[in-house]
Image (tube, grey):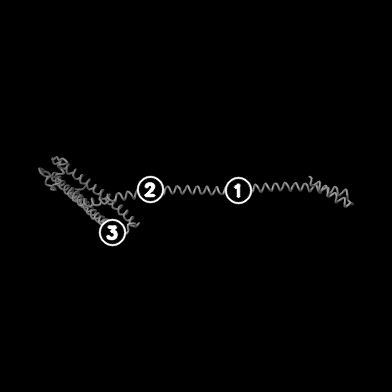
Amino acid sequence: MMSRDDIYRVIQEVKQELEDLMADIKKTANKVRAKLKVIEQNIEQEEHTNKSSADLRIRKTQHSTLSRKFVEVMTEYNRTQTDYRERCKGRIQRQLEITGRTTTNEELEEMLEQGNSAVFTQGIIMETQQAKQTLADIEARHADIIKLENSIRELHDMFMDMAMLVENQGEMIDRIEYHVEHAVDYVQTATQDTKKALKYQSKARRGELVDRIEFHVSQTKDQVGAGRLELHNAEDYHNKARKLNELFRVHSGQLKDNSSAIVECSILSLQQFSRD
């Protein structure tokens, strides 16, 4: 189990770590602010020489985005400091109540603004060790609040400066976001139109192919029909030729030794074939 001295030492170490972190944050914030200022000045100088530069517009957009993010971070940091101050103030108020002294929020704020921890100990009789510890805690919390107020005050000017910059750039950023959002809509619409065009093109190609197939099928049907007609005629001629040959054979058998009769018979057979 930790002794009272060990607890006190741990508390002091945590407080020192907190103070170091606050100092680092302040130092980093000042560096960021200075760099953003330099970027802003460079942009203003180049605007007079090359107003239509795409690279310049990109840098302005990036600077505006970074400035806004910086203000958001510092706003959150300021909110954290304020919350911590309120918790410290609440603990002081509870400790004063332990000693038998009741204060309102307004009275406590007035006491904090005086910046003198003696105002909290007026009328307190330190008869016990617990009372002494309570008084020490009150003084420590008051010192924490004083440090927080100084930190908040030091960052106030920087915060207001960057907030003003972001406010002035807000309209430009809103316009950029508006165009970006509409550009996304246009891209989506164009993508949908492209898909439709490809679909129609595919259908058109299939339709053209079907037309070609139908054309060739039609041609094939015509050729088949013509072939069938010629085949029918050929069969007809073949049958007639067979009949002619039969007639010629019959008449030739009847007129074996009479040449003129054979000729006449042939002529007769041809005439009969023509009639058939």
What kind of residue is marked 1? Phe
Using a 10 Å C-alpha cutoff, classify the residue at mark 2 as few (fewer than 14 neighbours), some (14 to 19) or many (20 or more).
Answer: few
Residue 152 position in % (x across, y down): 20, 50
Residue 117 position in % (x across, y down): 13, 47
Q: Earlier in the sequence, mark 2 or mark 3?
A: 3
Q: Residue at x 53, y 48 (%)?
A: 204
What kind of residue is marked 2? His
What kind of residue is marked 3? Gln
For the C terminus, the quadrant is: top right
Extreme-bottom residue of the structure: 49
Using a 10 Å C-alpha cutoff, classify the residue at mark 3 as few (fewer than 14 neighbours), some (14 to 19) or many (20 or more).
Answer: few
Q: Earlier in the sequence, mark 1 or mark 3?
A: 3
Disc nearest the viewer among 2 and 3: 3
| Residue holding disc 2 | 182
Q: What is the distance, in whole Å, between disc 1 and disc 2 at their CAs?
A: 48 Å
Per the rendering, the mark at residue 45 is: 3
Q: Are marks 1 and 2 in contact (CB under 8 Å)?
A: no
Which one is in front, 4 or 110?
110
